[in-house]
Image (tube, helix red, strand yellow):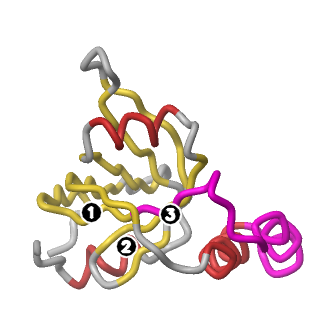
Amino acid sequence: MTTIPTHVDEFLSQILVGVISTVDADGRPRSAPIWYHWEEGAAYFFTGRQTLKWRNIVRNPVASLCVDWREPPYRSVILDGSVEEVQRPLYDLVLSMAVRYYGEEEGREFAEGYREQSEDTVIFRLTPTRVADYTGDE
């Protein structure tokens, strides 16, 4: 497992939206904004099993996640790594992310749509094998 410097861990723990990039069936990169949950050196996500990003991951289980601060001083971290489906309670993950991104009231309301564990939704984890640090911290 790649060692994550403390300042990178702190940067990824902020409330920022990431952009995940996968490779499609024709070998072209595909990128999409995505919520993430940073925990113990890995990024966790959820998505529908029929989404292009998940179909790409099933075919080629690697991805890149770019998380950036879009105001001066601009900063970013890019994680490249392997992706795998993980088993954990969907509602708990969605609730923690939704409250983080939307706030308490709206987050809880959003998460209600995920209270039932659905076979149509997948939780997956990106474990970084490479970290590009453009935060300016050391």
Read off the magenta span.
Answer: 102-124
Quarter of the image that includes the C terminus: bottom left
* Residue 68 position (above or below residue 86): above
Q: Is residue 101 magenta?
A: no
In the image, what residue type sits under mark 2?
Phe
Among numbered discs 2 and 3, the one appearing first in the sequence: 2
Camera-nearest residue between 128 and 27:
27
Left-right relation of 97 to 106: left
| Residue at 70% from the left image edge and 77% from the top image edge | 95
- Which secondary structure, mark 3? strand
- As drawn, the label of residue 11 is 2
Q: CA distance from mark 2 to mark 1?
A: 8 Å
Q: Alpha-carbon neighbours of circle 1 within 10 Å: few (<14), some, or many (≥20)? A: some
The tag on residue 123 is 3
Q: Residue at x 44, y 67 (%)?
A: 44
Q: Is 109 on the left or on the right of 3, as rendered?
A: right
- The picture places residue 12, in percent across and down from the top left corner, at 38, 71
Residue at position x 24%, y 66% in the image: 127
Say which quarter of the image contains residue 27: top left
Q: Camera-side residue: 100 or 111? A: 111
Q: Which residue is mark 1?
A: 135
| Residue type at the position of mark 1 | Thr
